[in-house]
Image (cartoon, helix red, strand yellow):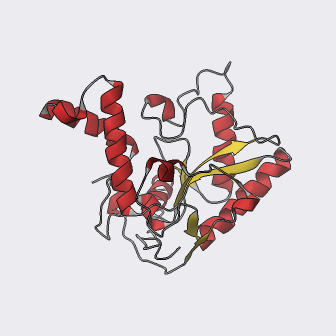
Amino acid sequence: MKPYQQIPIVECGEPLIPIPLEQFAARTPHPYQKLGAPYGKASPYYLRQSVIEALFVAQSQLQQQHPGWRIQIFDGYRPVEVQQFMVDHTFAEVAQAQQLNPTTLSEKQQQAIWEQVYQFWAVPSSNPMTPPPHSTGGALDITLVDATGETIDMGSEIDEVSPRSHPDYYANQQDLPYHHNRQLLKNLMYSAGFRCHPREWWHFCLGDQMWAWLRNQEDSTNTLIARYGGVDCGAC
């Protein structure tokens, strides 16, 4: 169990609604759907209503600083089945990157790879007390694009399983633009109420267990709990 999963959840019942993609930028076709992830009737471009409202606040502040720039949505809502698919896919990718056959790994090799995977990916739990963050509708993966539609270089790709994905990885390399770009994204999102995954510069949350845990870590007098638990997207 990860520390944030100990945060209690009192589900507020707020609906999942579609992200108005015409107001933002989006990766299409969706990268996980392109891989064959089993969304069924669900959509990766849904979030809780208040999360979308906060996202508009962040983008408005971005455009005050950089006219024409937009937040690019990489991923939003994720059913547990998709979480399982992507965890398995990432395991195979990590094994192959190490020139290992995923089907003939020793127990020790498997354990080492799973430890790498779960540094970044949440366990695809169906337990209502420990939902994966993206399965709550309160988490999203994003980056920025400029006024011409070009993606801002953050120094690593979204979902990269490596230390380069840690938000402050480039903090001591001021001759490179990556830390500045990541800080711009983080500051915008924090000002709108979001918090950032400690290991992923692209992952932001609002209202879920991770968000509450991070807020409580910032201030020991906080006793925040999560208002979003796992949710079934249904026919969204």
Q: Quadrant of the N terminus?
A: bottom left
Q: Residue furthest left?
A: 107
Q: What percent of the width, then of the height, locates residue 202?
A: 56, 44
Q: What percent of the width, then of the height, locates residue 217?
A: 45, 53
Q: What percent of the width, then of the height, locates residue 192?
A: 67, 59
Please tell me which residue lies in front, 209 or 53. Answer: 53
**For residue 127, side relative to residue 183 (left or right):** left
Is residue 80 among what the camera can see?
yes
Q: Is residue 101 above or below residue 193?
A: above
Is residue 122 among what the camera can see?
no
Please tell me which residue lies in front, 211 or 36. Answer: 36
Q: Quadrant of residue 133?
A: bottom left
The residue lying at 69 percent from left, 44 percent from top is: 144
Please tell me which residue lies in front, 208 or 34. Answer: 34
Q: What percent of the width, then of the height, locates residue 3?
A: 34, 53
The residue lying at 37 percent from left, 64 percent from top is: 7
Q: Is residue 235 above or below residue 62?
A: below
**For residue 123, side relative to residue 51 (left or right):** left
